[in-house]
Image: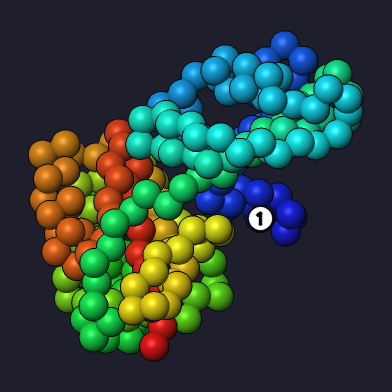
Amino acid sequence: MEFLEKWVEYDYNPIIFFNEKGKIKSLNAEAQFLLGQASANELFELATTYGSETYGFKTTFLNLEFGRFRFFAIAVGYESEKEIGIRLYQLPSLQYTPAKEQGELVNIYSLIDLCISSSSINTKATFKKDIDPTLPDVRLQADQFLKLLNKIYSSASGKELITNLFLRVGEYVKFENKKHTIFSLIVKADKFDSIAEESIKSLASQISLYAEIKPRQIRIDFALISS
């Protein structure tokens, strides 16, 4: 995947490209989540309604809501009749109440490797990682985080478990008069045990993390506090 493709893929804002008949040609990861709340037809209608009258790009500020997703603007662009793209600008929706002194600076890569090492003993699944290598040490309650990630891995089943770690471009939280970027850890599997859902959410909440659980993936969002 080229750099630009990665940039689009990991953008916090949903990006979708349609053909002239409204069929999706490509989309990024966040747009895949959005399609769980909005139909492709609804989003294509938005693109054709708010696109420029002539070829080009147009940004419109408006309030949109699809399930848990809230947007404050959309950008629509097209250079021919055969393709049109839309980008929806998402409002931060996560609520964090962490105090800066909570936790200690830790290497999150080491914590992930430790969890994978211990979890792989009890499963035949293959563990794979797709991780942004640029994250600094982050302030985190390491013991509680290890419990959370081990719980996620133990609830997963399938031949392959994939762990993604990446910055959420364009999203931040603010406390103590400082802005902190948000990053996400996503674990993908064929299936997750629904019985573990409440336990995972509870463990995440105890250390001020946001957990989103879907049938084939679990996402944990963090505030990047590196001091």
> Looking at the image, is 200 positioned above or below residue 227?
above
Viewed as shown, does residue 55 lie left or right of 85? right
Q: Position of residue 52 (x, y in %)?
A: 80, 27
Quadrant holding the C terminus: bottom left
CA neighbours of label 1 inside 10 A, class few (<14), some (14 to 19), many (20+)? few
Q: Quadrant of residue 132?
A: bottom right
Viewed as shown, does residue 65 lie left or right of 218? right
Label 1, on which residue?
7
> Looking at the image, is 205 positioned above or below residue 35?
below
User: Can residue 8 be seen in the rendering of this structure?
Assistant: yes
Q: Position of residue 127 (x, y in %)?
A: 39, 56
Task: Report the amino acid beneath label 1.
Answer: Trp
Viewed as shown, does residue 27 lie left or right of 72? right
**Circle 1 SS class:** helix
Residue at (17%, 76%) from the top-left corner? 143
Residue at (42%, 29%) from the top-left corner? 66
> Looking at the image, is 20 positioned above or below residue 151?
above
Q: Quadrant of residue 113?
A: bottom left
User: Can residue 44 be seen in the rendering of this structure?
Assistant: no
Q: Position of residue 158 (x, y in %)?
A: 32, 40
Residue at (75%, 20%) from the top-left corner? 19
